[in-house]
Amino acid sequence: MPKKLGKRTDQRMAMLKNQVSELLWYGQIETTVDRAKSVRSLAEKYITLAIRTYKDDVKVVKTVTNTNAKGEKSQSQVQFTNDGPKKLAARRRLMAELVDLQEVKGEKESKAAFRARIKDTKHPLIEKIFKEYAPKYDKRKDELGQGGGYTKILRTGNRRGDAAEMCILKLI
């Protein structure tokens, strides 16, 4: 049974949603042990969902008609890769259950370079899950022969003030 963490359900779910998103975006967070255990449970479910569906792609060939300056029409075949039905459903579920974190412009990065870097990415956290974490943990699953165990909790001691047991929750 999940812990209530001293909060109402809506507040608890919002807090966990934010912390899971931060964990998946930055790779580690510092929090209390009880919160870390709840966050770990959700994060591992989301990563497992991505691992099961990240290979579901559909190749689509579309015919594009171009008109040049002289008025001549030419047709060309363009190949796209779309999400398959399972991957699309998983992507939509993750978008509904995670906070949509956005890319941050680097200190020395120009505005034009930043826009060019994020041009095709509408949901960077979701893209990171499907393009970075899912292949990495799927490969790990094949090597070790087991799924799960994508996070680890490192206890750091007690917090000053309320003596809550603190830890760092990391993605392996």
Image (cartoon, rainbow, N blue to C red):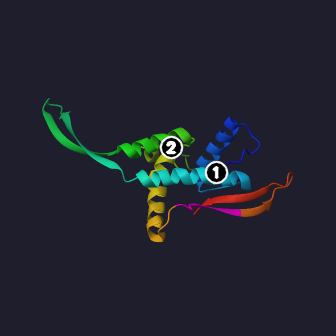
Instruction: Report the amino acid beneath label 1.
Output: Val
Q: Specify the farthest residue to the top.
A: 71
Q: Residues within 10 Å of mark 2 (few under 14, many from 20)?
A: some
Per the model, the C-alpha gap separating discs 1 and 2 is 15 Å
Would you place residue 32 above or below residue 123 in this image? below
Q: Residue at x 72, y 37 (%)?
A: 8
Label disc, if present, on residue 140 of the rendered structure: none
Q: Residue at label 2?
A: 94
- Camera-side residue: 59 or 42? 42
Q: Specify the farthest residue to the bottom.
A: 143
Instruction: Report the amino acid beneath label 2.
Output: Leu
Q: Do we see residue 32 in this rendering? A: no
Q: Residue at label 1?
A: 39
Horizontally, residue 28 falls left or right of residue 156, namely left
> Which structural element holds mark 2?
helix
Percent coordinates x, y for residue 113 in the rendering:
46, 47
Q: Which residues are magenta?
A: 148-154
> Which structural element holds mark 1?
helix
- First-in-chain label (1 vs 2): 1
